[in-house]
Image (cartoon, rainbow, N blue to C red):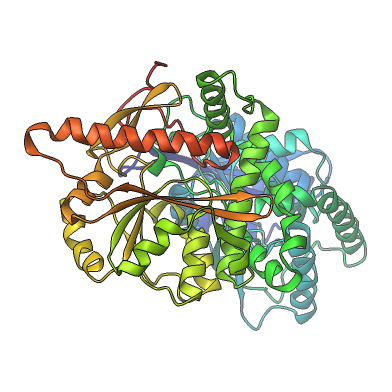
Amino acid sequence: MSVKDTGAVKALDACIVIPIYNHKDAIGGTVANLAVHDLPLIVVDDGSDDATQIVLAALAAQYAGRLTLLRLPVNGGKGAAVMAGLRAARDAGFTHALQIDADGQHDAADVPRFLDAARAEPGAVILGRPVYDDSVPKSRLYGRYLTHVWVWIETLSLTIRDSMCGFRLYPLDVACALIDSVTLPTRMDFDIEILVRLYWRRIAFRAIPTRVVYATDGVSHFDVLWDNVRISRSHTRLVTGMLLRLPMLIAHKFMPRKAAGPALPSTSSSSGSAVAKDWWRINERGSHLGMSLLALSCRLFGRRFTALWLHPVVAYFLLTGKAARDASNAYFARLHDAAPQQLTPRPGWCSAYRHMLAFAQSGFDKLAAWSGQVNDTDVRFEDPSAFEALAASGRGALVIGAHLGNLEMCRALAVRGAHTKVTAIVYTSHARRFNSVLASANRQFADHLVEVGDFGPETAMMMQQRVDAGELLVIVGDRVPAHEAGRTTDAQFLGATAPFAQGPYVLAHALGCPVYLFFCLKERDGYRLYFEPFAERIDLPRKARAEHVAAWAQRYATRLEHYCRKAPYQWFNFFDFWARPHGGANERA
């Protein structure tokens, strides 16, 4: 049966897999309760006795055309039966299989909830999270928690809340790819090990609370001695595997899991797609939990120890982030080709690694600054005269920076030093997880932080009162507006034509205030600030507005190129900067 989501380009073709071994009294009721959902049933007989085979044959006749009966010649264990059922479902063309035990413990009425969750995230494993009543044996209940703890250790995560529930839904492509490539256990330990190994493969998990009832006359095939031995042996393998994968598992904390499976079509392009994405369409990589763990480590163990973790994390993102790696290489190629006589990094794996590492260190320094672990002595001006003169005048100003170096760390120091007349105007929607971590490090993070979608006259009206109050408005000039209708102008940058936002210059014209450029670069002895006058006032006459905007954008691009050459690894634009907002990349000049 094909179940389609008419609101999106997604389809779900699911069946139900029921492994059975000698549950002749319960299987009839289980099949009847599941049949109401009108899904194909695959019952896998794991070498049951003659009495159970008679019952199964009768059910196959009763539900002819809806129930497929597979028989394994000898009892191989629950894992063997489930794997046989999953492979049969895949070979029949199904995209998903809902596994449910034959003993009637699980609430078949929850099947639609599992299917709805799978429609929402077709690549995720949907797990039942048991809700027990008083019928559950306490020894079984407490024994399960021991396994849960081991699974949490093996995954370094609490994502898999219950690894033993026999009510779950698998996306067949990822499940069968695993069972075809790895030797999995065939007994009761199968349910545990397949989940841990799927987690290691970065599959997403979702949990559905479901009622579980233990019948007083129910038949259990759990061998208290040997199945516990098998489960202990499985945990030993998994803990060993966890230790071998430890750097990658820690790196995974910084990257959200993907729940879009290749078997179902999707309208979104992947990060490694050949189609260039606009920067605001690129999803923020890194999980909130992973970033929070770094913040906790920074507080507990200090910056120097915590910074060591950045290396395996960056190595992971280097290997998995093809789009960012390609963008980094393209940037260094332009940097080198524009001035081959200068010593500039050559594109390659080494330069891309150093580039991404500098980006990670910049974020780490922002966190340290907002946590109070960076002192004013770590940051100094190259020439403070322009800044001191502006501060002494009491005037407000527009300050244009870039995604070069670390402007945010300077804002943190300004706030901590009670210099609150600094307002950052930012696009924050693409970095909410990281910003929330910074906010948790310091409650003042969100003060004087204004999120906008574009810089234009409407933004100028909102900002005018801040400038009149003597505030410094800090914006960046090296990102095009975050929507397709954004206004851009072309400028020569690193030997090629690139689109730059018109907004900063339109905003400066509307505010009628002085304009400065500001860059904060990391050097051997700390951070160095470069604060230089850009214009006492920017005027954009109506008759030649486009020409004047282009001239100011070119002047900014020239200064940006100067500082990119000064600190080549510190310009953090991991996308095709030279691509048009509406189309392909510009050719080299």
Residue 187 relative to residue 175: left or right: right
Q: Is residue 269 something that shows in the picture? A: yes
Q: Nearer the viewer, residue 205 or 552?
A: 552
Looking at the image, is 342 positioned above or below residue 426?
above
Q: Total marks drawn?
A: 0
Q: Nearer the viewer, residue 430 or 579?
A: 579
Which residue lies at the image location 52% right of the left edge and 30% below the top edge? Answer: 327
Give residue 200's position: percent from left, percent from top.
Answer: 71, 48
Q: Quadrant of residue 544?
A: top left
Q: Nearer the viewer, residue 156 or 483?
A: 483
Q: Quadrant of residue 7?
A: top left
Query: The N terminus appears in which quarter of the rendering?
Result: top left
Which residue lies at the image location 66% right of the left edge and 26% below the top edge? Answer: 348
Give residue 577's position: percent from left, percent from top.
Answer: 42, 32
Q: Nearer the viewer, residue 442 or 23?
A: 442
Query: Quick one: which residue is furthest to the left in this view?
Result: 543
Give residue 393's position: percent from left, percent from top.
Answer: 30, 67
Give residue 345's position: percent from left, percent from top.
Answer: 64, 28
Query: The C terminus appears in which quarter of the rendering?
Result: top left
Q: Quadrant of residue 493?
A: top left
Q: Is residue 168 something that shows in the picture? A: no
Query: Quick one: which residue is furthest to the bottom in this view?
Result: 134
